[in-house]
Amino acid sequence: MSSDSQARRTIRHNEAARRFEFTEDGQLCVLDYVLDGSVASFVHTGVPAPVGRRGIAADLVSFGLDTARARGWRVRAVCSYVAAYVQRHPEYQDLVD
């Protein structure tokens, strides 16, 4: 895990729903993806406003990218938040098409 906050959070990979999930104060936060072969398109990052600004979206994206790397997936950053995250974190740029 790449950050202290992520290490404290239990992010779940819900493969059936094709998303990464974390619940904070009863609010479901998600990173949705579409898998086509070995290419994961990260299409939506959703963190409800009441739990925003806590680094949850960044932790979801980091977890998703780490999962993609471990599974040998390429990533398409369809979601603008994911694209901006990868721009700020060059260690993930090799994953992105």
Image (tube, helix red, strand yellow):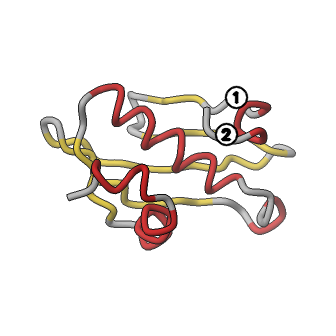
Instruction: Count how many numbered circles sit on residues in the image.
Output: 2
Q: Position of residue 88 (x, y in %)?
A: 51, 67
Q: Nearer the viewer, residue 30 or 2?
A: 2
- Looking at numbered disc 1 in the image, what kind of residue is underneath it? Thr
Seen from the viewer's position, the closer of residues 43 and 57 is 57
Residue 19 as seen in the image, left or right of residue 53: left
Q: Is residue 44 left or right of residue 3?
A: left
- At horizontal 26% and vertical 57% (from top left) the residue drawn is 76
Residue beneath the point at 70% across and 38% down:
6
- The residue at the point 58 percent across, 29 percent down is 12
Q: Where is residue 85 shown, x and y percent of the image?
A: 50, 64
Q: Are marks 2 and 1 in contact (CB under 8 Å)?
A: yes
User: In front of the other: label 2 or label 1?
Assistant: 1
Q: Is residue 22 left or right of residue 12?
A: right
Marking on residue 39:
none
Disc 2 crowd, CA 10 A, few/some/many (<14, 14-19, 20+)? many
The residue tagged 2 is 22
Reading the image, the residue beneath label 1 is 10
Which quadrant holds the N terminus? top right
Q: Amino acid at mark 2?
A: Phe
Q: Is residue 10 above or below residue 29?
A: above
